[in-house]
Image (tube, grey):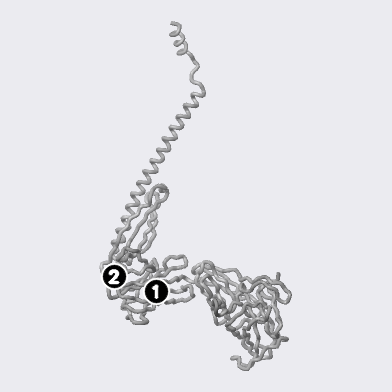
Amino acid sequence: MAQIRRMLDRARSDDGMSLIEVIVAMLVFAVISLGVAYSTVTIIKMTNDTRSRQVATNLATSQIDYARGLQDPFLVTNDEIVTTIGQRTYTLTQTVSWVDAGGNDVGCGTGTGVMQSKRVNVTVKWDNMLSTTPAVRVDTLISPDDRINDPNLGTIRISVLGVAGTGMANVGVTISPTSGGAALKDQPAPTNSDGCSFALKVTPGTYSVTINRSNSVDTNQATSPSKSVTVVAGGSIAALFQYDYAATFGLTYSAASGALLPTDLDTTFLSTYGAYVSSGGAKTQVLLHPVPSGYAGVAGKYIAPIPNGNQGCINVDPAAWPAGTVNGKALNAGVRMDNVAAAPQGSASMTIPLGSMTVTVPSNSYLFAVSVAGAAGSGDPGCAAAPTYSFGKLSGAKTIALPYGSWVLYYGANANGSGKLPVPASSVGLVGGVLGSVTTILAGGATVTLDPRTAK
């Protein structure tokens, strides 16, 4: 009876649950609630992703149906389409390539096989898709109604890419036979959005493929570049071009104030594609291929040296001058002006530095400057081409500007230079170079070395 009484006393107790027991209970509830909430959110995301995948599949299938409905594989090109459905954005990426008889992909600028059919892939992605969800991908092959290739004829594939590596559209294409072959009945259509065009059923032989589009140039600064291709029976050949809208560079020739420039001055533009020389006098602007790394402009005609051969003409380039000492003055190595870049159809300004000197000639004399080897110890890297520049008819004392290097000045009564005489050393003076250079008349009379280097 005592034990039963004690149990009844405990049942009538008002102590309740302890604080620790309450906290533990709340923690257990929170953990369970968090798990339920996370699961609920995950289920909602997966449900939305599943719905989005169904929409993406429908979009991809519709795009494939559209491509097949064109009934002409030449009209099916690379494309990207962005669309919004139900407040969700979907991106369709369509990539295409020709397929040869061996099942290999053949682009308009790659491969050598004949074109049999066109492979079309449509990939669809959407915003906020789960990281574990793969993109929707649908593929198909489109075969032309008529046979593209003839075992007795060939195909020319033209590929035109811009500086960004993307196709250049609406570029005109002209193909003409140069050896064997035959004139095409119809010229190829302008390039499509992939930068591709095709000449089908071409008689075997060698052809010149020329492209053209207004305000466009290739890496050699040609407005209408050409490529030679040879067509063989039952085969295909690609003609590849890098061609884009030109960039405009405004030019400023920097020399001593009031200095006269040669009337036939050359200007060289150096880039990763080599040297391009603009001849016929100074220009206020020039159109160039929009190389992303830009151009460095130098006055004069730069000619790259040939290993174990011609030394070229490199002294017009300030960067070709090594550090050294001239007439007791220590000089830093020469440097070019900074590269200048502009986007396609964009513009930029470029400075072309020159050296300067003063010269005095008899009245109505024609003045000429002839490139020569620099005197011993000048540090002049040389110019094997030995160009000559003209200044026209002058009188008295003038300040003139010339490309960097070593020069001998002549004057005469005739514009063609016949009977010209050397200008005496006493009639030649120096003007500081635009890069703060030290310019000196070295031992040897009237040989003048215009040096782009700065004093240490």
- Count of picture labels: 2
Residue 311 shown left or right of residue 214 in the figure = right
- Which image quadrant is residue 314 in? bottom right
From the image, tell me which residue sits under label 2: 148
Q: Quadrant of the C terminus?
A: bottom right
In the picture as drawn, the residue positioned furthest to the top comes out as 1
From the image, tell me which residue sits under label 1: 172
Of 346 and 444, the residue lying toward us:
444
The picture places residue 397, in percent across and down from the top left corner, at 70, 85
Lower position in the chain sequence, tag 1 or tag 2: 2
Q: Secondary structure at mark 1?
A: strand
Q: How far apart in space, not on screen, are marks 1 and 2 (Cα)?
A: 21 Å
Which amino acid type is marked by label 1? Gly
Judge whether 229 appears above or below 129 on screen. below
Of 199 and 310, the residue lying toward us:
310
**Residue at the spot x=61%, y=70% of the render?**
337
The picture places residue 257, in percent across and down from the top left corner, at 67, 77
Residue 243 shown left or right of residue 103 in the figure = right
Judge whether 61 appears above or below 399 on screen. above
* Residue 364 can be seen, yes or no: no
Judge whether 416 appears above or below 442 on screen. below
- Graded by Cα atoms within 10 Å as few (under 14), some (14 to 19) or many (20 or more), the crowding at tag 2 reads some
